[in-house]
Image (cartoon, rainbow, N blue to C red):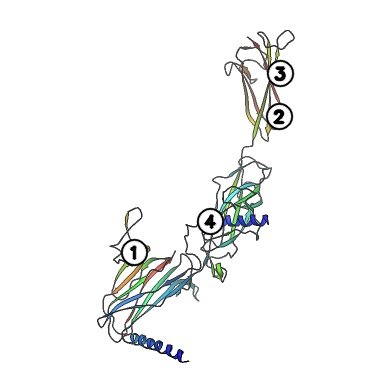
Amino acid sequence: MRRALLILVPILMLISAGAAVAADRSIELRTVAETDIKVIDAAGKEQTERVTATKIVPGDEVIYTVYFTNRGNDATDDVVITNPVPEHMFVRQIETSQRPMLVVVSVDGGSQYGSPRDLTITDAGGRTRPVQPSDYTHVRWTLQEPLAPGAEGSVSFRAQLQ
Amino acid sequence: MKRLSAAVAALILLLVSAPSGLAMGTPAGTDITSQATVVYTFGGNVYTLHSNVVTTTVIELLDVDVVWQDAAPVPVYPGAVAEILTFRLTNTGNGTDSYALDGLSALAGDDFDPLVTDIYLDSDGDGVLIPATDALYLPGTNDPQLPADGWVNIFVLNDIPGSVTEGQRGDCQFTASSTTGTGVPGTVIPGGGEAGLDAIIGTSGGSADQIGSYRVSALPVELIILKSAVVNDGSGGNEPVTGAIITYTLTVATTGVATALAVVITDAIPVHTTYNPNTLTLNGGALTDTVDADGGDVAGTTPDTVTVDLGDLVVGAPVQVIAFTVTID
């Protein structure tokens, strides 16, 4: 009984410390994976419905969206969101964001970032070519303005399963 | 026990023949995970936080492809048996699947209907049917199982009716259907996939077929020519001396099951001999030595050569006998 109590105390301390961060100065980040499916509505018309992607097969497209919210009491600066492209997925396109963003990508596993226009790929034969969305390994968004308390937004890319 | 181990070996070879480096689709059962990171500045400090991890599971896509392998219609003769059409069955899905096979030869649009007798699996992967090592397909018993992107050659054997004629085409359709399920693309088969995953029917509908063809060839014909010589030395003997007469006899027979067209027999007059004019005969009847309507001549068509045009020799035509004499110089 004594032993159990001793262990419990430090855990509780850690939890309270984490909660304090979340309350005061945290950005909340939430990732969702969704896919568009075709459904027939009551009127018999085909509609596209976006649903959570739990099960997919090769060729399916998944929209990865990162929602961010400033849960703190003050504005945060220099917000940079990085989303690695999942293994087996190829980026089809980076969706436009509602907030002003600088978008850069990496094609080398996250070592270097740049505008897709400025990056090149050198193949095994030594030839250099422009990068394509399917080459992206990471996508990075930099907010061009401070994020006010309570403000929220999202960034996303559409990818296809190999 | 010996039979069992042979069957096991055949199965292993079947799996080994599948290429491994060509995986095109993400394997069924793969978990695709995604987690974003944010870095920001607050109160002069830089913070890094991670999002939740979102996981999406790749389920099994059922897809299959069949391609007829023979470059052209397989040539056959009337009444031929166990003629082989070769098809390649490929698992174009992303998980291991097995297939029911079927051959159908009662098709419209061709000239005759072959008769499907057997289907064999190319167990040893050499592309050649060897009944001793390749497995006879028994539906439901040895439905071929293929990993994603794996393939196996399939031999479909047909008998050819005896009534067909040269140039006619007979088709046979080979079909492979996923034993997990077939139907409308997009149909989900809960728990039907590899390792109990859900399976979903792909664009192939879980089934693929292709038609292979036979074409009836010109029939095999063979001429058998026998030549004999009898020497008469003029003094009751058969010594090949100067002045002796040699009677040459050629018999021409056909074998096979078709007409031998425009048969022309030529035979050179041997050196050191001289043809005896007006001795050429066909089936006992005289032929002139000049080129004319009787079809036979000596040295007319070709110098120093006997030529006899026999025309078409139909199946079962009587043996043709050509004879002539020469004198030894």
Image location of residue B288, percent across then percent down: 65, 15
Give whichever of A119, B239 is nearer the camera: B239
Q: Earlier in the sequence, mark 2 or mark 4?
A: 4
Q: Earlier in the sequence, mark 3 or mark 2?
A: 3
Which numbered disc covers residue B18?
A: 4
Give whichever of B155, A24 is nearer the camera: A24
Chain of the residue on which disc 2 is drawn: B
Chain of the residue on which disc 3 is drawn: B
Is label 3 or label 1 in front? 1
Q: State left or right for residue B197 relative to residue A77.
A: right
The residue where tag 2 is placed is B317
Image location of residue A148, percent across then percent down: 28, 83
The kind of residue tagged 2 is: Ala
The kind of residue tagged 3 is: Gly
Chain of the residue on which disc 4 is drawn: B
Above or below, B6 against B56 in this view is: above
- SS at badge 3: strand
Is label 3 or label 4 in front? 4
Disc 3 crowd, CA 10 A, few/some/many (<14, 14-19, 20+): few
The kind of residue tagged 1 is: Asp
* Residue B113 appears in the picture as rendered: no
Q: CA distance from mark 2 to mark 4?
A: 54 Å
Q: CA distance from mark 3 to mark 1?
A: 95 Å
- SS at badge 2: loop
Q: CA distance from mark 3 to mark 2?
A: 17 Å
Q: Is there a contact, CB below 8 Å, between mark 2 and mark 1?
A: no
Above or below, A46 against B266 in this view is: below
Chain of the residue on which disc 1 is drawn: A
